[in-house]
Image (cartoon, grey):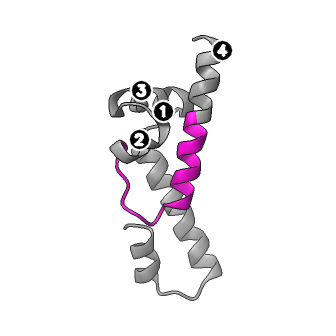
């Protein structure tokens, strides 16, 4: 892959990861995230897996579980509420 292409993809994926972090409690789909990266859904998925090394679904699940784990430790919210906020 050309360096300029890799840099462009890296910037796009970084933008998507920041968007994910800001919207973890919301329903997210590949089309919305591909739009954020200015790529088609198909191409976005291929680029994402290539650059990150895991699927988008795995990333979402991992980040939501992390958010829930932190909430369990740092808040007094009921477990059911934390699970709901983490989309579980």
Which residues make up the magenta segment? 12-30
Q: Secondary structure at mark 4?
A: helix
Front position among marks 3 and 4 = 4
Write down the residue under mark 4: 3
Q: CA distance from mark 3 to mark 1?
A: 6 Å
Front position among marks 4 and 2 = 2
Write down the residue under mark 2: 35
Q: Are marks 3 and 1 in contact (CB under 8 Å)?
A: yes
**Residue at (60% x, 26% y) in the render:** 8
Write down the residue under mark 1: 48
The circle on residue 10 is none
Asked if residue 8 is positioned above or below residue 74 in the image, the reply reads above
Q: Earlier in the sequence, mark 1 or mark 2?
A: 2
Write down the residue under mark 3: 46
- Label 1: few (<14), some or many (≥20) within 10 Å? many
Q: Secondary structure at mark 3?
A: helix
Dominant secondary structure of the magenta stretch? helix
Q: CA distance from mark 1 to mark 2?
A: 13 Å
Q: Secondary structure at mark 2?
A: helix
Q: Earlier in the sequence, mark 4 or mark 2?
A: 4
Q: Earlier in the sequence, mark 2 or mark 3?
A: 2
């Amino acid at each position: 892959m050309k360096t300029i292409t890799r840099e462009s993809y890296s910037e796009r994926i970084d933008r998507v990861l920041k968007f994910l972090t800001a919207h973890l409690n919301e329903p997210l789909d590949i089309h919305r995230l591909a739009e954020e990266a200015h790529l088609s859904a198909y191409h976005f998925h291929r680029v994402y897996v290539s650059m990150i090394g895991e699927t988008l679904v795995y990333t979402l699940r991992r980040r939501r579980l992390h958010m829930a784990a932190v909430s369990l430790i740092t808040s007094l919210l009921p477990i059911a509420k934390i699970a709901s906020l983490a989309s579980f």
